[in-house]
Image (cartoon, coloured by chain):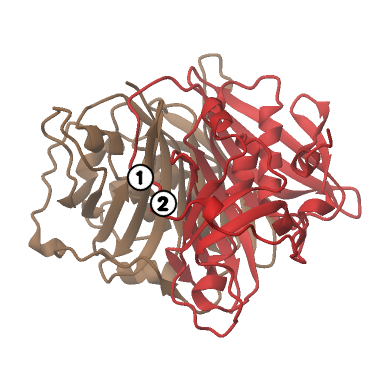
Chain colours: A red, B brown
Amino acid sequence: MEKHPFDIALDLLPMAPGVYSGATTASYRNMIGPFGGVTAATALNAVLQHPALMGQPISLTVNYAGPLAAGAFKVTATPRRTNRSTQHWVIELTQEDKDGVDEAMLTGTAVTGTRRPTWSGDDSALPSVPRPDDLPESSPISAVEWINRYDMRFIEGKFPTHWDGSGKTSLSQLWMRDRPPRPLDFCSLASMADIFFPRVYLRRALPVPVGTVSMTVYFHADGAQLTQSGTGFLLGQARAQAFRNGFFDQTAQLWSEAGLLLATTHQIVYFKE
Amino acid sequence: MEKHPFDIALDLLPMAPGVYSGATTASYRNMIGPFGGVTAATALNAVLQHPALMGQPISLTVNYAGPLAAGAFKVTATPRRTNRSTQHWVIELTQEDKDGVDEAMLTGTAVTGTRRPTWSGDDSALPSVPRPDDLPESSPISAVEWINRYDMRFIEGKFPTHWDGSGKTSLSQLWMRDRPPRPLDFCSLASMADIFFPRVYLRRALPVPVGTVSMTVYFHADGAQLTQSGTGFLLGQARAQAFRNGFFDQTAQLWSEAGLLLATTHQIVYFKE
């Protein structure tokens, strides 16, 4: 069977415990550098590949320090503290500059943990929306390559087609899954947390320069619940809370097709104008 | 003039560039270790005291690796990359264990940045609530010392008084400020981001064991806007989105008394039962 493009993008070669080499792939190319979701997933993958890993992902924060150049990179994941229920990770992704010096392209932290059965409840229910099968598949014809790697079926707040400054809302709702379909796991969930296009595009209907500065993902599901989600769609919902002098935030939820809240995520994005 | 207890708690003594020593204070004691808000503010303060600092806080993530023992600690803030508009920081707070070895008590990252005037807008408006002067001052009589350091005036979702499992909602709204009043700055804003008591207490009306694992704060205001807020109250609003097998999230907003969204914040919290 042919290897899925997401698995190719995530491939890491161990160089030492917690130190891995990887490389960007054309399949997830963004306007400048690779899609940030895949870079976040790569950072998480370094944690998940570590021989000392305890538990499953609970939280992940990545800070995008600079756009990755096409080619090789190094990822380091270091467990700084292991408790009974949680393990604390520091992550860094670097590339060599022209003088061969490692330059930080991403800094981050993660917490993994042991989940034990407790009382559970979702306070944020799946919105009432059409089912993915009732919506058309998106066409894989974008000039921005990573967008073709996902089937995105918008319900609300689709990518503006008229850049006329007429935007009023920052809310998007869409069904999404890997294209071709791939069983959901923690890395693909982390990647999809970054699928929402910049809220400022929608809010203003203007294509201003942007770049994500920092993203955090909280994982509410365990591996078994992700496996249950399989190759089904996820419902994503995102909106902004504030745009102010060069930076705005995005706050988002990702539910399984069955309605389980799998992850909540936040990011802060740089913008101009 | 007597030094404010918050400034005493935040005091850092430089040992080397980016390396500081500090100490816990009884004024912000929590049930186990100090109030997490003050620890987050201390981490941010290490960044703000750094001689190489560029810009103002944009985002802060702190991961609570272990409860601080009463006494001395060391904070390290390292600028890993400085761009034209943003600077990326890695933070660590350690205490010596019984063998004199530094043990990680907190890991974190921050991004500082230069703010330039852009189009701005709040998508999350101050809720319609009574003004702080129309609500009674909270009594500084808690056995948990840090709670006495804030005047908290609840509108919705106050701390449960009957632990009878009758909870239905995770939403709290309250006016808050330092007690005694202290002009708002980035550190006190970071601290107040952690003021919301665990949502599981409210949602279940049950006092189960809890501990914050990770908190992220996005700063939407610059220093001048914080100065304008002065010693006024902030409106805080917090709710949970999911409780699942040992962990739940909190998502919150902090507005100035004049209605400006100053910060948005998120945390993931460990709980039992």
Q: Where is residue B152 in the image (x, y as percent from the top left)?
A: 19, 50
Which residue has dot 1 on it? B194
Quadrant location, the N terminus of chain A: top right
Dot label at residue A205: none
Q: Quadrant of residue B161?
A: top left
Above or below, B127 against B62 in this view is below
Quadrant location, the C terminus of chain A: bottom right
Q: Nearer the viewer, residue B61 or B98?
A: B61
Above or below, A261 against B53 in this view is above
Q: In this view, does A232 lie to the left or right of B145?
A: right
Give the CA separation, mark 2 to mark 1.
8 Å
Q: In which quarter of the image is residue A31?
A: bottom right
Which residue has dot 2 on it? B265
Q: Earlier in the sequence, mark 2 or mark 1?
A: 1
Q: Where is residue B5 in the image (x, y as percent from the top left)?
A: 29, 46
Within 10 Å of disc 1 (Cα), the crowding (few <14, some 14-19, many 20+) is many
Query: Number of callouts in the render?
Result: 2
Q: Nearer the viewer, residue A90 or B128?
A: B128
